[in-house]
Image (tube, grey):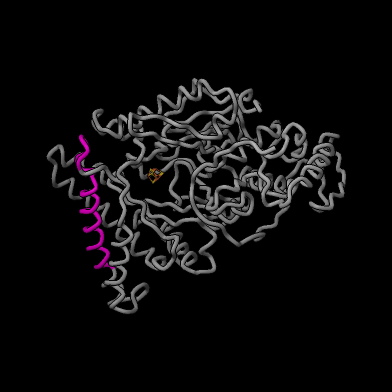
Amino acid sequence: MKLTFIPLKFSKTSSKKENKYKEQNNYVLNKIVSVPVSSYGNIQLNGISDNYFKAKNYLDNAKKDFDDINNIEIYDLDLNKLDGIQEGIKVFKGLNMKEIAFIGSTINEVAINRGCHNVCSHCYAGANPPIREDNNHINKMSWNDFKTLTDGFKELNNRLGFPITRDIMDDDPYMTSFHDADCIDIKLKDNEGNEHDFIDIALRLKDSFGKPQIFDTAGWSPNDKKAQERAEKYAEYYSDPDHFDEISDFNISLNPYHVLHTREVSLRKGGNIEKAEKFRDLYTTRMANVFFTFTPLLDNPKFNIIARAADNSSKGTEGYREQDLRNLYNDICTKLEKLYQNDYNAEKRIITDKRSIKQNIYSYKRLLGYINTKPSISERLNKIYSPENSEVKRTNIIISKSRENIRSATNIHNILNGETIKLNAYETAYPNYAGLVDSNGRYYITNYYTTYPTELQLNFENKDKQTAPIHPYLNEDLPIKKTLINSL
Ligand code: SF4
């Protein structure tokens, strides 16, 4: 049975680095049964019931109906009959196959770390600095929960014989290891105190979910030595063509909305020009260092600058317009040129040939060719922009109509297929939903304008811990109920 499923329209590429990490899966073992399963290898399961064997028989027979196993997606199968195939996999305890299929079909963001110090006003995820951790609160996933998640999906995919996350219509899939965090800060310590950085985490996620990760950063303070060390490591690692395919994109986020520039704009509006100039200097110095550090990545085709700003003619957006961003960019490139010259005159760490200074600056200027002037309006930006701004109005219409759609949804495919939202007589928006696993295992879906909690939660050791609120515009009054997810 092939159900109509319009895929989530994200982009990106495929990859090759497989099986780098082969660690013991942490399935619960009570009564250990060695189950010879020829196509999946020998697996050990506890407390296994008839459901597993029935599901496996159904799966083996169902696969015979497909000419090519590479064409199977999870919703092609009868999920009632497949229920049980997940038995013994710790992360899925308490979830049935319809619920797991919903997560597998939508999962796009794994919130490893929660919170960000950049506090960009355009941040769709409304990131604030990380909350303080205590007995009841966490600001990151535990290493055990990260392993439970990645090991669990890997094992399920092995049992299925195809990745549950597969969408055959998406030829350029990707995922992110963040929701409201900057990738320069993504790192986890394991139980032995070893730190796992973005490279390691991205490889493990790709190995389990079959999708390369995006690296996004809005930069770091040049005084943050540890962040600088990580950045230099990433620049070296991802400038090696052998590693190009491990990620889908490596992005610098450059925009007038960073907290340092937002402060500049507000100080300038208040007439405090001297202090405004200090904040401008802080931001442009910081970004010049980011560009300098990532210069080795200019040859990586996955290296991009993500630039967002308000349209030059849009109302109530002074200080945040495309021209303001281009002016910032010119200041940053002037400082970058000085950094290159200093490097050439001293260490020659990045610049060994003086001619490359102009070439690199030219390459960076080319990367800023396109500026997105129609981003969704975040909760913070909504308070800064005039209510008359056309993008504010557009975002508000999408949120309101999305709520109507969710309220009237009678079948989970109403959600999986995405939304059609008529904005006016000429314009229609087609937002799709992406799933988000919070650090405590709670599952949400977002169309990047507004967010809905679901009644699903993965079986994490920290499932009872609280995290910072999820944005944008969390509709706590409209949860995606299990009854809807099971309505097939
Ligand atoms: S947009 Fe990115 S860098 Fe800026 S606050 Fe949000 S998560 Fe942080």
Which residue occupies the extreme bottom position in the image?
A: 353
Quadrant containing ligand 1 reads top left
Residue that appears at 50% across and 69% down: 241
Magenta stretch, main secondary structure class: helix
Task: Return the residue nearer the eye: 84 or 183.
Answer: 84
> In the image shown, does 186 or 419 lie closer to the viewer?
419
Location of residue 296 by image quarter: bottom left
**Residue 191 falls left or right of residue 326:** right
Question: Considering depth in this image, is 216 or 365 the residue closer to the camera?
Answer: 365
Q: Is residue 360 above or below residue 252?
A: below
Name the residue located 70 percent from the left edge and 34 percent from the top edge: 97
Q: Position of residue 458 (x, y in %)?
A: 63, 35
Residue 243 visible: yes
Left or right: where 184 falls relative to 173: left
Asked if residue 347 is among those painted magenta in the image, a careful observer would answer no
Disc tally is 0
Residue shown at 39%/29% (left/top)? 422
Provide residue 487's location: percent of width, then percent of height.
65, 25
Q: Is residue 217 above or below residue 231?
A: above
> Whole-percent x and y of residue 187?
52, 51
The quadrant where residue 350 appears: bottom left
Can residue 195 be seen here? The reply is no
* Residue range corresponding to the magenta coloring: 313-339
Left/right of residue 192 with respect to residue 382 in the rendered view: right
Of the 4 image quadrants, the one containing the C terminus is: top right
Magenta span includes 320: yes
- Image position of 287 with respect to 463: above or below: below
- Image quarter in which the N terminus is found: top right
Image x and y of residue 194, in percent: 59, 55
